[in-house]
Amino acid sequence: MNVGGFFGPVTVNGNNYICKVVSKKEPDMSQFDLQKFDLLLRVKGRKAQERKELFEDGLVHYLKQKGTVRIHQETLKKLIDSFRRT
């Protein structure tokens, strides 16, 4: 994308934006090898966290259907309200 070019719409936190490139900086490839490992670890960690959340959500859903786990909505509401007050 060239300086002065537009792209979008891009959705960020539920808001739509049209973006304009106002400046451009060429990448410093001497730092790429140093940053690649760090980026790789972050992506792998994020994916592992997402898989864990999906597994836990599926497990809770299964156990609720089976009747092994019950969620007491009134107790949950009280707990959430107590966190909001602090």
Image (cartoon, rainbow, N blue to C red):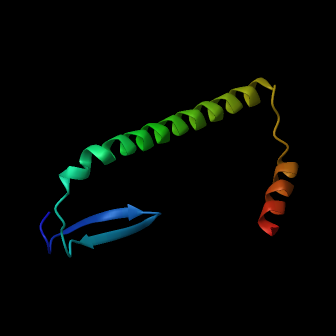
State which quarter of the image contains the C terminus.
bottom right
Say if 60 sits above or below 38 in the image. above
Query: In terms of depth relative to the viewer, which is nearer, 2 or 72?
Result: 2
Locate residue 56: give its quadrant.
Answer: top right
Percent of width and height locating residue 63: 74, 27
Locate residue 59: give its quadrant.
Answer: top right
Residue at the image position 26 percent from the left and 43 percent from the top: 33
Percent of width and height locating residue 39: 37, 45
Residue at the image position 48 percent from the left and 42 percent from the top: 46
Say if 33 sits above or below 60 in the image. below
State which quarter of the image contains the N terminus.
bottom left
Residue at the image position 84 percent from the left and 61 percent from the top: 82
Q: In the rendered picture of this protein, how many numbered marks are placed on residues?
A: 0
**Is residue 53 shown left or right of residue 47?**
right
Say if 21 sits above or below 58 in the image. below
**Is residue 78 shown left or right of residue 49?**
right
